[in-house]
Structures are given as structure tokens and as C-alpha cells.
Amino acid sequence: MPPLQACIDGVRAMADSRQIPLEQSSEALFVTVYARLKAMAARQLAGRRHATLDTTELVHELYLRMGQRDGLQFEHPAQFFSYAARAMRHLLINRARDRLRLCAGGQWQRVTLDDESLKLALDTAEQALALDVALDELAQADARAARVVELRFFAGLSLEQVGETLGLCRRTIDRDWRFARAFIKARMA
Amino acid sequence: MASTPSLRELFEAALPLPADVRARLLAERCADPLRRAQVERMLAADATEGELLVTGDAAHAASAIGETSVAQALPGGSRIGSFELVEVLGEGGSATVFRAFREAEGVRQEVALKLLARGLYTADAQRQFRREREALARLRHPGIARLIEGGITDGGLAYIALELVDGLPLTRYARERRLGLRQRLVLFLSVCRAVETAHRALIVHRDIKPSNVLVTAEGEVKLLDFGIAKLLDEDPSGATRTQHRALTPAYAAPEQFAQQPVTTATDVYALGILLDELLSGRHRAAGGGATLPSRIDARSLATAYGVAPSLAAVAPIRRKLRGDLDNIVLKAAASEPDRRYASAGALAEDIERHLDSLPVQAHPPSRWYRTGKFVARHRGGVAITAAFMVAILASLSIALWQARVARHEAQRAEAIRDFVVALLQKTAPDVPASHRPDIPTLVYTAAASLPRELRDQPDLHAELLYTLGNVLRDMGDPERSETLLREAAANAATLPQTSSVRVQAGIGLVRTLIRRGSYDEAAQRLAPLLAIPARRLPADAPRGQLLKIAMVVEDGRGDMDRAVSYGREMIKSYRDDCAAGLRCDQLGFATHDLASVLLDADRVAEASGLADEALARKRRDGTPMSLANTVELQSKIALYRGRLDAAEADALQAQALVDSLGDSLHRKPLEPRTQRIDVLLARENAGDALAQAQALLVVQHARKASRCAIAWSELQQARAQLLLHQPQEAAAAAARAFDDGAACHTGTDVTQILAGLERGRALAAAGDRAGAEAAYAAAAASNARVHADDPLSWPLYLIEATRLAGSLGHGDEAARTARQLLGALDRAQASPSDPWRLEAELTLADAGAAAHAATASDGPALDAALGRIRSWPVGVRLAQWRADERGRP
């Protein structure tokens, strides 16, 4: 599938079938979470392109900051992590889309990155978009499994924490994760 | 199989099984080959190691994709649209700016090309972009960098080409050129004016900051990126809503952080921050402190103004900043949008006021402050030697007085501006015409929702209320006018009894009560105002004015003696004022008004003298309209006194004066035309009278004039038709006049009595004796009322009653009304050749009243009268009668 098309469809599908229905006021909270996350990610990623950035660290730090400094109240940590997961997903997809757009324009020259990094960047971008689509399909087949993926992959929670967040026993989460992982990997292969 | 197992059931059932058993299970339980292949792929995927993405979890993946930099991706020589990029001028979060150029017909055009980081993928987003771009392209102002072109590349990249401005940011320019405070303010005024222009085109900048306000080498201000922030911003309803809004934290207004609607007030805030930085050199942190510009540390100030960083060097700057400029910055950059200046223009005006040493709106009112302003403005006038101490003291007292007025004026100006804005918002073009309220409704609702802070100032609040109440009354909505004025009077009750606002609110209410016909309450409310001694009354409510209102109230109550007495007192009061050099122009109105009341009191001869004075005064300095009023009054007096030539000349002159106003008058008054027809009828020029009455009726119907006014024209029509021997038509017209006359207020229902009388005459002429008798009986019963209610119509009533009684053979009654008529005309010092007088005398003679007959048939008076009116019907009758008389033994 052409990457650009996948991206657009992915964003649309995401907007239409949100895993977590949000109230109007929650929408504002989500916007804040997203803006914060984006700013933090940008700061932390700047200047250390090859350094790795840990999702868990990023999201947890955001959680602490928002609670302490902004006094933002979440009814339940689960709410925050759901927002954070969705925000992280937006962030990743937007980056992937921008990266592919710059290369799809035709008149662009590849001067930003060395060839190897660029290849990795492009591959990752295409994969990220494919993941986004696969995750939407998974949500159709098994909504809870899709949530587990969001919390695990995008919010950086351990499976233990996912279980606590969703109020499910560890065994169920393990099964969900295993099914989800196989579903997505098979879909992306 | 009863039911098809789900994907998950298949996957989990197969998972623990060895490979060959899996194949059998799937073959058994999954008939769909595609589904079976999917499960097999999943089982294979499950066996592999690794994260979902090769690069790891979400953050790792994001990191691998990296942030994409437009600047690095587009080296010099790249093309965007018709432009060739030269170099990067700047790079921000949401856009990258290049210097670029294009060749068109051999001319190289250099532009600043802004490439939006946000892609526009959907048709909606692209449409929105084009719409904004067109609005911006229409924005032309020398202080605003022009939008040259905008477009979207095939790859979905949006770009805009702007006029390339070679200049320095405002703050840096001021610093490097070491501009003085005044020069800085003058530069800043140009910024405000440019912003104001854009606001009028409904374009908000949203991102005003020093780097967007450049000053060229020629010293001209250019604003960059007007409205661009909106282009950069996300569609708030779209899927991409979550991206951050384009704003610069240090200059963004609180509502921008709160994701509330951005309005022109947002730009006013940013202008306030910019002004602060320009004046104090301070860079504010986002949401930064509220330190006044004059309290900024010496180093910042010294750097900003290029002076030595010593306390002594910055002290003069600080002194100039303290007060007005501190307050202007505070007001412009207030956190609540409604506490800021209403517009960039209002901010500019306040700065101009400061530059002119006038009181600024932003200042908390204080007497010393105003006095200080006065002294600064009149430095030449007040800074004199000690020998002129007395003069200084005098100036000071004037200053204090002016200070009070100035504060009041500034507040009022602001309140009224806000009020008008609120009014206009209600007539916004997006409100369908059928739903737009009419102006009185607008005024009323706006008055009812005057801003709360106004209510803390009872004087200002009451003043606005009574002003609006007066407007409503003059616009013909006395009912709601009364509501507002009652509230105004109630609010003003806490003010001193002799304060201008309290007195004016009282006067306004009395006037509306008069309009509503509530004369008794009007008299009651007027009494305390009349009790105030003349010298303690406020300058805008002279005693003469109160006396005039008292006169009108008594006139309305029917107490003519008191009305005339108030009127005489009023004239005296105005004559005293005029002798002291005050309000001489009011004497013209005063004499006119008393003349009207005297007419109402059936004191025609006295009225005539005053009307002459009114006319003489108004000829000197009256407006055409006011002059027309008096000339028409003269015509009425002349008509009453049988001086028909003068009456006709005056009516024509009044008409000409009204016509001279051209189209400036929305609705020209019709009274002069009515008066002219009355004169024509008195002259028995029936043809012209009928034509004009009918023409007037057409106009009145077109204007939806009051039924009472229409009734009078119908009565005139009937009178003319009767003179033309058209009794049927006359009876019909009189019947219409009678019906419409029912709409007249009590006191003016004389029209109806006259219509009944006229109908009786028409019926008599048509041979319907019974109908005529009935009509006559009804009209005759109202004899006394006509005199009391409408003395001006009294002669007409009497002559028509005399004629009808005569034609019905009631000689005695005819003689009685004829005598009444002669009495009235004598009192009015009417002309001996008045045709009605002659006719009355004739009637008496017919009835055998010898005394009158002698004077009537004899003497030069009748000869002279006959000479002039020989061709009139009455003249023909008189000549006939005289011939008969002479033929008698």
C-alpha cells in the first residue's frame, strides 16, 4: 500500500473509531497531555538522534509533571495513561507522515540524514503507519486487545501495569497481548 | 459446526498444539481459506522474536524517524511554486521562512517565502487555506507587509510569499537608534493604526511580537505575518486538532493559552506587551510579572535607551513612564479581555492623549492627576510670577472644575463607545433582516443591559439612561422611554438634589409623562424641580426651561391661567438671562411657545404680539425649521383674525422654508400644507383647496400618518366639496373624517365635532333634512366644549354652526352662534373685512337684529370688503343681500 495513503486513512480511522470515548472536557485534557508530550519529546530527542528515548520514562515523567506542576487532576491514572497512549500514537504517526511527505514531494533532496539513518527513518515511518492501520483493524476484531497494545506500546506500561490499569488479571492481559502481537505482526508482515 | 469460531478462538485453540495437529484443527474448524491463512500467519508471527516495530517502542520509533527539518531539506535553488529559494531567513515550529525570488517579464521580485510545516491534505483544509489567503491578499496598508501569493504544492505543502521587508525589529530599532520616549510612542502609534486597519477588515494578527514589527531604514513601520498565525493553526474541528496552536508564549494572551476564542482583544494584549518592551526594555517571560514599566531595573532601562546604567541617568525616563504610560500598559495587557482597550485604535487614542498632555482613559481618576494635566497643557498660561498669585488661584479653581468635567467626559466617551459597539453587534450582518430589531428596541435592550461596572457609578448610569430615554421618546416610543426614565430618576435619587444628572433625569421623565398624557404626575414630579432657586440650578437646566415645561403641563391639564402665568414667568426668566448675556437664543423659542399657549387660551391678540417677537428673533438666528414653525403660527393667527392675504403668504413661506431643507429631512412636516388649505377654504377657493387636500391625503396615507391628522384633511376635503356643490361627496368625506377623528385624543376630538357639523351641512344641501337636524343637534350640544378645548377651531365651528342653523331655519340659534363668532373675532381684534365677520353680521341682520344690520349694510367697511371678495360665493351673497337691502323701502 502506498505510504501516504495509508497515513491519511490511518488518521481518519483513528478519529472515527477512538478506543476511548472522550467527553468534551476530557478533550481539553487530552490536548494538554498531547502538547506536553510533544514538547517533552522534542526536547529530549533534540540533539541526541542516536540516543534512545524510553517511552516509559517519557510518559511517567509527564504524569508526574502534570500532577505536580500543573495540578491537573485525572479521575484515575488509567485516564491519564489512555490519553498519553493516544497522544504518543498521534506523535508517532504525525512524524511518520511528515517524514514520508518530505520524501514524496519529488523536489526534495535527501540531505537531512546520512543514507543509513534515512533508510531507517523511512522504514520506521512506513512501519509506524502500517502499525497504525493494523491497530485499527485489531480494534475491530478485539477492542480490549487493542487497548492493551496502546497502553503497552504507546504509553510504555508493563503488562503488570496494564493489568492494574484495566482492572484485569495478569493472565488475561498476557493472552490479550500475545494475540494482539501476533495479529499485528501478521498484518504488517 | 454450529457456529464459526472467532479469530481469537481459532488462534488460542491452535496455539498449544503441535504443528500437524494445528493443521488438522484448522482444516476442521475453519472453512474459509483466507481466514485459515490469516491464523497461520499469526501463528508464525507469534513464534518470532522482537518488538512490534524493528526500532523498538513508540518513543524509539519516533526517535528513529526524527524531526523533519524543512530548511535542511530545501537547499538554495530549490523551487516552490514559481519561486526559487535563496536562503533560510528563519525557522520556527510551524513554519520556515526563505528569501526567495521569481523572474517575471525580466523583473526580479524578491519575497519572503513562508513554508508551512503543516501539510494540507484534505480538501477542506485546502479550501480554508485559500479562503484565508484571499482575505489576507485584500489587506492593503502601508504599515502591513503585503501578501503576494500563496499556494499549495503537489506534495500538500502550503506556502505564502510576502513582501520582503528589510528592517529591524521595533525594539531593536529603538535601542540602536537610541530613540527618545516620544519617538518610540510615535512609532508605536503607527503600529496601532496598522493593526486597527486589519481589525476593521476582520483580520486578527494573533502573533504580534517584536520580530513581526519591523522598522525600515526609512523609519517606516511594517507589520509582518498578519493573520498568518491562523493559517498555521489547526482546523479546530479536524482530526489534527491536537497539534499545538501557533503562538509565542511571551506575547500570547491568557485566552490563547486557555484555547478560548481569539479576538481583536488578543492583539490589543500583545500590543500592550510590545509597548511595555519598547518602553522598558524588559523581555517578559510567558505570563510574566506585572511590574510597571517605570519600576523596571535601571540596567534594562539603560540598555533600552542607550544611556549610562546609573540611577541618575534613568531617573528622567522613569519619571516619564510613571503614571500614564504605566497605566496604559496595564490596561492594554489586562488579563481579562474586557478590561483591555476596546480596540487598537482606542489604545492609540490614549497614547495620543498622553502625548497631548490630555487625561488618558487608563488612569484611575484622581483630582490631582487632572489638575496636573491642565497645568501641563496650559503651561504658558499658569506659570507666571508671584505677583499674579490671584490669577494662579483662579486658574487652579478652573482646572479643578475642568478636571471633573474631563473625567466625566472620558468615562462617558468610553461607556458610550462600548454601548455603541454592543448595539452594532446586535445588528451584525449575519443576523437575518427579518430578525433584526428596530432601532427603539435596540436602544431599549442595550440600555437594559448596560455594563455592570457602569452601575457602580450612579451618575454615569443615570445619565446614559435618561439620554436613551429621551432618544426613545423622540423616536416615538414613549412607553419604553418612560421605563428607562423612571429607572434613571430612581438611580439619580441618591445624587444631590441640584446635580445636573438628577435634574436632567427628572426633566426627561416629566417630558415623557407629558407625551403619555399623564399631566398630573408630570406636575407632581416637576414641583420639586421648580422649588429649586434659580441660582442653584445646574447650568444645563436653566429655570426658564423648567418654567416652560410647567407651562406645557398646565396647558395639558387645561389650567390655562396657570399655564399663561408660568409662560410669562418663563419669558421674564429668559429676558433676565439674556440681559446677563446668557441664552439669548432661547428667547425666540420662549416667545413662540408662549404665543402658542396664548392661542390655546383664546388670547389671540396677545399671542400675535409675542409671535411677532419670536419671528423677529428667529429671523436673526433661527434654523429654517424653527422659523417655519413660527411663520406657520403667524399664519394661524392671521387666519383667525381674518387677514387672509397675510395668512396665505405665511403658509406659503412656511412651506417654502420646509422645502428649503431639501432631502436632509427624512420626513418633512406636513403642517404648512394643512394650514395653506385652511386658508384656501377661508378664501373659498374650493377648487385649489380640494386638489391640495386630496394630494395631502395621498401623502398621509403613504406615510401611515396618524388617523387624527388624516381626519382633519378629510374634513377639509368635505368643506371644499360642499363649496363646490357636491353634497354627496362632502357627506361621505365628512363621515370618514368623523370615523378617523375618533382616533384623536381627548381635547382634540373637536375634529369629530366639526366633522359631524360638516356632514350635517352636506346632508342639508342634499335634502336630507332629518339627517341634518340630527347632526346639528349633536354638534350644537358641543358648543362650549369646542371653545374650551380648541379655541383655534372655534370660529370655524361657529360659522359652520351658524350656516347649518340658518339653512335649517333655526334663526335664533344661528343668531346666537353668529354673536359668539363676532365676540371671538372682536376679542382677537379681527379685521373688519373678515368675510366670516361679514357673514355673521349678515346673519344677525337677517334675523332682524337691527343694530348689527346697520353697521353691516352701511359704511365703507362693507364696501371695501365687498370690493375684495366680490367674486367669492360669500361676496356674491353679500352683494345680493345689499342690493335687496337697498331695494327695501
Image: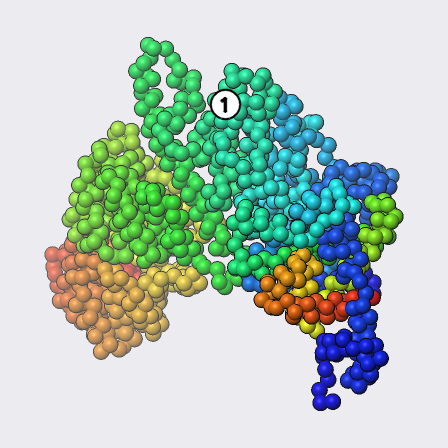
Secondary structure of the residue carrying numbered label 1? helix
Say which chain tag 1 marks: B
Residue A98 vertical placement versus B270 (above, below):
below
Quadrant of image for the N terminus of chain B: bottom right
Residue A126 vertical placement versus B185 (above, below):
below
Q: Foreground residue, B399 or B243? A: B243
On screen, residue B4 versus residue B517, left or right, reads: right
The residue under the point 65% across, 22% down is B177
Q: Foreground residue, B123 or B407? A: B123
Residue B533 placement: quadrant? top left
Q: Residue A4: tell me if it is visible.
A: no
On screen, residue B281 versus residue B392, left or right, reads: right
On screen, residue B61 versus residue B453, left or right, reads: right
Pointer 1 residue = B318
Q: Where's residue B710, x and y in %? A: 35, 63
Q: How crowded is mark 1: few (under 14 residues within 10 Å), some or many (20 or more)?
A: many
The residue under the point 34% across, 48% down is B465
Q: Residue A104: tell me if it is visible.
A: yes
The three-letter amino acid code for the residue at tag 1 is Arg
Q: Where's residue A168, x and y in %? A: 60, 68
Residue B374 vertical placement versus B47 (above, below):
above
The residue under the point 73% across, 60% down is B122
Q: Which residue lies furthest to the bottom in this view?
A: B2
